[in-house]
């Protein structure tokens, strides 16, 4: 199964479910709910929830059973984007080809919309009626997994070091920290959560964790490359924004060619992690290959 077909299928599945798990767009207070809906439906491939679903299916799980968690990670991802775009952080005016949330609703509502999506994610993940077919210990473990990944020792920590490194000459270890924590931890958590909720063995979970770590870092390196070589229509944001802000990136430190080689190597390592999985893991394989195809 080709990655694009699988991702389109998962995107449709997720998009159909999102309104069921959100307050109504015109519900009071209307401004916050409009803002939440705006960013959630401003585009995006739903890559992270698709990885969660693919991981669940790779170990024999059912996508319907993990759906609340899949929607929740999209809420979390959207919350990070809304906050990243704010003037105090990246100060971006475009996201997925549309004006960023704060440009439409103002900074205060954008901050609160991000906060609300973060909270709503945990409402979904801890709702016993939505997750009654999953063992409680697996729900607790998966919830803890994503909370840890989003914390100050995860995504937020990576964002802090990224922010503090702007305009600075960083070394390779600092750059790797930024990429692994800001982006890689979230990818890895999505892969692990799908497996945990679906009753993966310790061996399967360990292997899928390595897969998630490799593709998470590969994704961010490729994102760095696309900021230089991509087009605005492809990226949905201003090209060259990393350069303009003197961001710490792989191309800035190692050059384009070396960065491409690193991304390719990580994808190869990710694929190697799946050697002992059967055809049910093919979507994970195709998604890893798709990462490289975005650039080369």
Image (cartoon, rainbow, N blue to C red):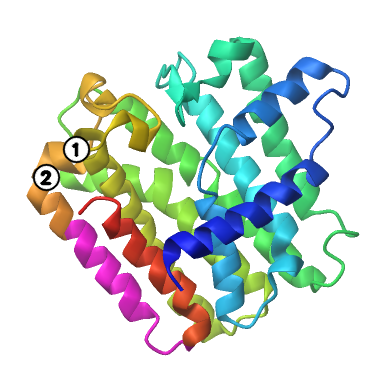
Query: Is disc 2 in contact with disc 1, using a CB cutoff of under 8 Å?
Result: yes
Above or below residue 147? Residue 292 is below
Residue 267 falls inside the magenta stretch: yes
- Give the number of the disc on residue 277: none
Q: Point out the stretch of residues depicted in magenta.
A: 262-278
Would you place residue 280 above or below residue 72 in this image? below
- Magenta: main secondary structure: helix
Residue at x-position 61% and y-position 9%: 106
Taking the spot 68% from the left edge, 68% from the top edge, the residue there is 63
Left or right: residue 225 compared with residue 58: left
In the picture provided, is 252 more to the left or to the right than 223? left
Q: Residue at x 14, y 36 (%)?
A: 252
The location of residue 111, given as percent across then percent down, is: 62, 20
- Assign the C terminus to one quadrant of the image: bottom left
Label of residue 256 in the image = 2
Question: What is the x, y in percent for residue 83?
Answer: 53, 26
How crowded pointer 1 is (Cα within 10 Å; few <14, some 14-19, many 20+) is rated as few
Q: Residues within 10 Å of mark 2 (few under 14, many from 20)?
A: some
Q: In this picture, is 68 found above or below 245?
A: below
* Residue 39 drawn in magenta: no
Q: Which residue is mark 1?
A: 229
> Judging from the image, what secondary structure is the residue with disc 2 in?
helix
Badge 1 element? helix
Q: Nearer the viewer, residue 103 or 233?
A: 233
């Amino acid at each position: 199964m080709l990655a694009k077909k699988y991702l389109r299928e998962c995107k449709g599945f997720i998009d159909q479910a999102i309104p069921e798990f959100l307050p109504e767009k015109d519900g009071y207070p209307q401004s916050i709910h409009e803002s939440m809906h705006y960013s959630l439906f401003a585009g995006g491939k739903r890559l992270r929830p698709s990885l969660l679903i693919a991981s669940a299916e790779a170990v024999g799980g059912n996508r319907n059973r993990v759906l609340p968690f899949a929607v929740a990670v999209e809420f979390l991802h959207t919350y990070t984007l809304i906050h990243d775009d704010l003037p105090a952080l990246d100060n971006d005016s475009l996201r997925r080809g549309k004006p960023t949330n704060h440009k439409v609703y103002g900074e205060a509502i954008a901050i609160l919309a991000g906060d609300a999506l973060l909270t709503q994610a945990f409402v979904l993940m801890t709702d016993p009626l939505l997750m009654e077919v999953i063992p409680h210990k697996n729900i607790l473990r998966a919830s803890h997994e994503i909370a840890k990944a989003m914390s100050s020792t995860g995504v937020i920590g990576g964002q802090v070091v990224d922010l503090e490194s702007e305009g600075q000459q960083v070394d390779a270890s600092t750059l790797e920290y930024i990429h692994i924590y800001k982006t890689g931890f979230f990818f890895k958590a999505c892969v692990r959560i799908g497996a945990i909720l679906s009753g993966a063995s310790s061996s399967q979970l360990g292997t899928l964790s390595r897969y998630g770590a490799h593709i998470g870092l590969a994704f961010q390196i490729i994102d760095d490359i696309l900021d230089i070589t991509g087009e605005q229509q492809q990226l949905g944001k201003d090209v060259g924004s990393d350069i303009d802000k003197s961001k710490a990136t792989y191309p800035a430190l190692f050059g384009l060619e070396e960065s491409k080689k690193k991304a390719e190597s990580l994808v190869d390592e990710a694929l190697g992690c799946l050697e002992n999985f059967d055809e049910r893991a093919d979507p994970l394989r195709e998604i890893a290959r798709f990462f490289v195809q975005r650039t080369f």
